[in-house]
Amino acid sequence: MIFNVYMLSIAFSILFLIIIIELVRKNRLLEKYSLLWILFGIMLLALSITPAFIEAIARLMDIKYAPSVLFLFGMVYVVIYNLHITVVLSKQSQQITRLNQEIAILKEKTGDFKTNDKA
Amino acid sequence: MIDPKVLVIIPAFNEEKSIAGVIREVKGNCKADILVVDDGSTDSTAQVALKEGVKVVSLPFNLGIGGAVQTGYIYANENNYDIAVQVDGDGQHDPSYLDELVAPILNEKYDMVIGSRYVQETSYKSTLSRRVGMVFFSWLLYFLTGKRIKDTTSGFRAVNRKIIRYFSSSYPTDYPEVDVIVRLFRKNCTILEVPVEMKERQGGKSSITPLKSIYYLIKVSLALLINILRSRGAL
């Protein structure tokens, strides 16, 4: 079988790594947020080219269909990365709140008060 | 402290109908400086407040009550106020009680004084769900800190310099009232409740809906429980 789930996974990880690096190169993804994705791509690639390793893990965990170890890995990684994103989001949310407050106070202090005339 | 610098913080979100009345009543009851925090209102709250000749800080976008009130504390901290008092912009809080709120801080060295609807029987009427919430939070607070506060959600409160400094660096963004009480007790601060009359809101409408109440209950309870896992000790 030339085209199997491992081949698919290898192709996907390579394409994925290329996309990530391209995004960083074009400054559309910050280096610090790309690190975890690059790690993901490399780990998925490593797992995909060593089916024997996957099968060993599957036997160890009593998983009947070995390639589902790949899916399990992908799922867990995405959940963890999502958590990471919400931590980043929370920090930014606090920073935006603070900026909002400081700007309002600064506007009052400089007398550069323009009321929000949205009505 | 012979002549304490007092700041009255009035958070207001779309309160153009009530804000002028609140400002005048505060002026009629004390000589404190007044700061209106316009929480990104879409009506003319800020303009109306400016016309009353008070300081107005206008947030570029709506933050919610916690973020708005904290803006007041940041301002109070930067301008070295000794005492800050929160008075809602919707006219529920009666400014004639301002002295009662400030006096225990000056004379008895309390860190925070809360104007409470429930210490004595007052004419204040509230909905059943609100009273159930009150009792629940009071109980949860007692369970977590061993201290009793009856009106945990009252936003009519005065704090001293130490708390102003603390609030300016750390204050919950939404639903802050109960959360803050637990935090302060954990930091060994002293809190006193004094009875006040509260009025029906003068304009605008309450932001509380049934679904929001449930979210409120769960979110605040979680925040309180998490507080217990934070470090204790003096401020």
Image (cartoon, grey):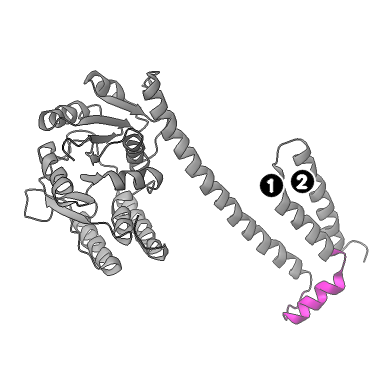
Residue lying at 16% horizontally and 43% vertically, measured from the top left? B102
Helix, strand or loop at label 2? It is: helix
User: Disc 2 to disc 1, how far (Cα)?
Assistant: 12 Å
The amino acid pointed to by label 1 is Lys
Q: Position of residue A86 (x, y in %)?
A: 55, 51
- From the viewer's side, name the closer residue of A71 and B199: B199
Q: Which residues are magenta?
A: A48-65
Mark 2 = which residue?
A20
- Image height check: is A39 above or below B42? below
Tell me if B2 is positioned left or right of A57 in this view.
left
Please tell me which of labels 2 and 1 falls first in the chain: 2
Q: Residues within 10 Å of mark 1 (few under 14, many from 20)?
A: few
Question: For the point 20% across and 63% down, which residue is it?
Answer: B148
**Left or right placement of residue B154 versus residue A107 in this view:** left
Q: Chain of mark 1?
A: A
Q: Does residue A5 appear anywhere in the picture?
A: no
Residue hosting label 1? A32
**Which chain is home to disc 2?**
A
Q: Quadrant of the N terminus of chain B?
A: top left
Kind of residue indicated by mark 2: Ile
Determine the image quadrant of residue B7.
Answer: top left
Q: Is residue B95 magenta?
A: no
- Above-or-below relation of B115 to A26: below
Q: Is residue A78 left or right of residue B210?
A: right
Where residue A110 sits in the image (x, y, percent)?
Answer: 40, 20
Q: Could you say where residue B133 lies in the image, as x and y percent from the top left?
A: 24, 58
> Magenta-highlighted stretch: main secondary structure?
helix
Magenta run includes residue A55: yes
Left or right of B116 in this view: A94? right
Outermost residue toward the front? B2
* SS label for mark 1: helix
Query: Taking the image as drawn, is residue B31 in sight?
Result: yes
